[in-house]
Image (cartoon, rainbow, N blue to C red):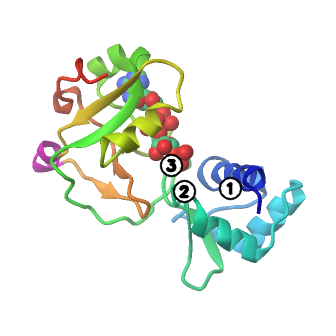
Amino acid sequence: MDRTRSIRISKLLSLGLRHDPSALGITTDAGGWTEVCAVLRGLAERNAAVTREELEELVAASDKQRFALSEDGERIRANQGHSIEVDLGLPRHEPPAVLFHGTVDRFLESIRREGLLRGARTHVHLSVDEATAMIVARRRAGVTLILRVRAGAMHADGHAFFLSRNGVWLTETVPPAYLEDFELLT
Ligand code: HQG
């Protein structure tokens, strides 16, 4: 599959599996899963037909491993990034002492005041290293900022952390007290 086509399919999958199942004519269960054949049908109806093999290839080759297939290959879901209510069934995990969050300077004042909020998504997304956080930050216009989150301290204080299958750390909110002095880290 060429790159342009696979990006288009990936975006449609993200939309349907994370945010708006009706956009793909599918429904998702409590764990965010949906039948592969329903997804194939939905894509075909949106002029984005792929074969089951192409879909499997796309899932395997996705740069960020955004999607997962069930063991029997009959169901598919997004690994993280949902705004629809979903229980991914992820176990709680002890995070590293420090995690990173990539954002832009125009959000800084509000983040300083409120901490990191999950917004439309089910969780705040944190990265394991600065390079990944930088990629997240660069999706937005503005001066990029990498925030250091004292995840170890949050964990010690009882905040739950989850690790998605594609290596994104998730937590409900990051109160300002756990954000390190980040003014110098632009
Ligand atoms: C900001 C992509 C003001 C936050 C990425 C971010 C990631 C605040 C934006 C995944 C705030 C939310 C998630 C506050 C947070 N005041 N702004 N109190 N708290 N923000 O897209 O982390 O390509 O929901 O800094 O790579 O940017 O879709 O979250 O800028 O993994 O697979 O509000 O999405 O993955 O934006 O990105 P988002 P995010 P995919």
Looking at marks 1 and 3 on the same chain, the residue that comes earlier in the sequence is marked by 1
**Residue type for callout 2:** Asp
The numbered dot on residue 81 is 3
**Ligand 1 within 8 Å, label 3 CB:** yes
Label 1, on which residue? 13
Query: SS class of the residue under badge 3?
Result: loop
* Residue depicted at 24% across the width and 61% down the height: 93
Looking at marks 2 and 3 on the same chain, the residue that comes earlier in the sequence is marked by 2
Q: Quadrant of the N terminus?
A: bottom right
Kindly report the distance in space between the C-alpha atoms of the residues bearing marks 2 and 3: 15 Å
**Residue type for callout 3:** Gly
* Residue depicted at 52% across the width and 61% down the height: 65
Label 2, on which residue? 63
Q: Residue 136: where, in percent of width, then height?
A: 46, 38
Residue 120 appears left or right of 114: right
Q: Nearer the viewer, residue 178 or 185?
A: 185
Q: Is 153 one of the magenta-colored residues?
A: yes
Characterize the local packing of mark 1: few (<14), some (14-19) or many (20 or more) Cα atoms within 10 angstroms.
Answer: many
Q: Are marks 2 and 3 in contact (CB under 8 Å)?
A: no
Looking at marks 2 and 1 on the same chain, the residue that comes earlier in the sequence is marked by 1
Q: Residue 122: where, in percent of width, then height?
A: 45, 46
Query: SS class of the residue under badge 2?
Result: loop
* Residue depicted at 68% across the width and 53% down the height: 16
Residue 86 appears left or right of 91: right
- Start-end of magenta stretch: 152-158
Q: Residue 71: where, in percent of width, then height?
A: 54, 83
Indicate the quadrant where residue 48 lies: bottom right
User: Against 146, is 57 above or below?
Assistant: below
* Residue depicted at 74% across the width and 65% down the height: 39
Residue 33 visible, this orientation? no
